[in-house]
Every structure is written in C-alpha cells, then in structure tokens.
Image (cartoon, coloured by chain):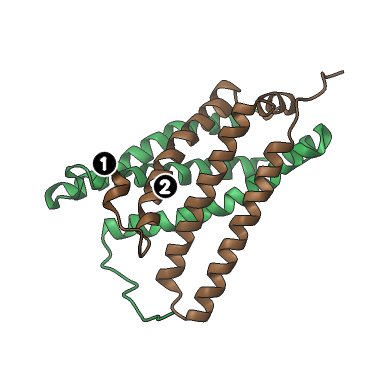
Chain colours: A brown, B green
Amino acid sequence: MALRIISFRSGTFNWLFQRISGLALAAILGLHFVVIHLISNGTYDYQTIMERMASPAWKALDICFLVLALYHGMTGATIVIDDYVHRAGWRNLLYVLNWLLALFLLMYGTMIVLSLKAPVAAG
Amino acid sequence: MKSYRVKRHYRWHLGYMMWLLHRFSGLVLAAYLILHLWVLSHLTKGEAEFNRIMDAFNNPAFRLMEIGLLGIFLYHGVNGLRVFFMDYGPMAKNETYVKYLVGTFFLIVLVFLAGGLAMLKTILAE
C-alpha cells in the first residue's frame, strides 16, 4: 500500500495525491474528450448535453472530475506560490485566496451539475 | 512562517524549459477551468441563453484558441505522465533522460498536429 510508506507531514500527501489525481484526470479527460468531441461530433447542442447531464452517473463522474481538477489545480498553484512568493504576508494572502477560489468553484460547479434536469421534449 | 530565498533559476536545459512550461500550462488550464464553468453555468438558464453564449464564442478567433487549448492540455497531460513514469522506469537515467524528453516532446507535437489539423479543417469547412 502506497499510503503506508509515506509520511503525512510536510506535504507528502499532496505530492502523492497530486500524482494520483493527475493520472485520474488524464483518464477522465480522455473520456470527456472522446464523448464530447468524437462521439457527439463536436456539436454543443443543448438537448444532447442536457440529456447526458440528466443521468446520475454523468453527474457523479463530472463532480469527481471537478473535485480532482480543483484539487490538482489548487495544489499546483500552491507549489508555484511557494516557489516565487517568499514574503510571509503575501504568501499567506495568496494561500487564502487560493483556498477561497477553490471552495467557491467547488460550490459553483457542483450546483451547476446538480441543477441540470432532463429537458422538456422539444416542441 | 519562516521564509527565505531559494534558487529560482536553473541552467537552461530542455528539462528545465519543459518544467517551466509545465507550470505555466497548469496555470493556464486552471484559468480555463473557471471560464469553462462560467460558460456551462448558462446551461441552467435555458436553451436560448446557452445558445447565445455558445454563439458568442463561435468565431474564428475562439476556434483557433481552442486548438491552442488542445495543445496546452496535451502538453500538460503527456509531460505529466512522463514525470509520473520517470520514477518507475529507466527515464531518469542520465543516458536515457534526454531521449525520453525529446520523445515526449515529439509525441505531444505529433498528437497536437493530428488533432489540431482536424480541428482546423472543421473551421475552414464552415
């Protein structure tokens, strides 16, 4: 078990989960791309999207996708902040903004995904 | 929190350039995620609103930027996989490191050309 051999101090968990989320994102992104651009033939048709998004499985997958992408992006941004911002005050400000942005996008994205319902038959 | 100066710059080596490009592309992708969520939020406002925003983005400038987006995704994804597998294979050895770097780079360019040309063809056909 990978989890047993790491220490949870000093960002080791973030290092490991950044890789795991990266691998998962590559796989889900591949699926996302194939379904939206190859199978649906690149048409961003409202009915097609709403029918797909009405399915609980797609909702669950898209929420996982969102959580992983936000975690991965937020951790990446933290590393960039660590490397280039050395004043404690600025660094803490950016950490807080990073967290707030990620939490906001998590709520925003989840609410969008959950609120989508199957469209009324086109009339 | 204790903070101190660290070395910000490394020797201009292909590996360093790809590392820089990796973080830059990562920040661009994070910014794109925000735009993507904002555009998709129009789905909740009904078909007319959604079509209005999609039409606003359906012009040659944005379509070309979409090809660039494909390139950025491919770069970040494929290079990320290289970084991952570097720890579990022969990629980190001195004699093979540059070979894998160049190989990764050409793989990205190849897939980008295939996908980008297909997208360009669709734009030109309209």
- The chain under label 2 reads B
Q: Residue at x 31, y 58 (%)?
A: A7
- Give me the disc on residue B103: 1
- Mark 2, Cα crowd under 10 Å, few <14 / some 14-19 / many 20+, is many
Q: Residue at x 73, y 33 (%)?
A: A116
- Mark 1, Cα crowd under 10 Å, few <14 / some 14-19 / many 20+, is few
- Asked if disc 2 and disc 1 are in contact, CB closer than 8 Å, the reply is no
In this picture, residue B30 sits left or right of residue A111: left
Disc 2 marks a residue whose amino acid type is His
Disc 1 marks a residue whose amino acid type is Gly
Q: Which residue is mark 2?
A: B76
Could you tell me which secondary element the residue under label 1 belongs to?
helix
Residue B51 drawn above or below residue B22: above
Answer whether residue A81 is visible to the viewer in this image: yes
Seen from the viewer's position, the closer of residues A122 and A44 is A122
Residue B90 x, y percent position in the rendering? 16, 43
Residue B106 x, y percent position in the rendering? 31, 40
Q: Residue at x 22, y 43 (%)?
A: B88
Q: Report which quarter residue A102 is drawn in.
A: bottom right
In this picture, residue A95 sits left or right of residue B81: right
Q: Residue at x 29, y 42 (%)?
A: A1
Q: Report which quarter residue B59 is drawn in.
A: top right
Seen from the viewer's position, the closer of residues A94 and A1 is A1
| Same-chain status of marks 2 and 1 | yes
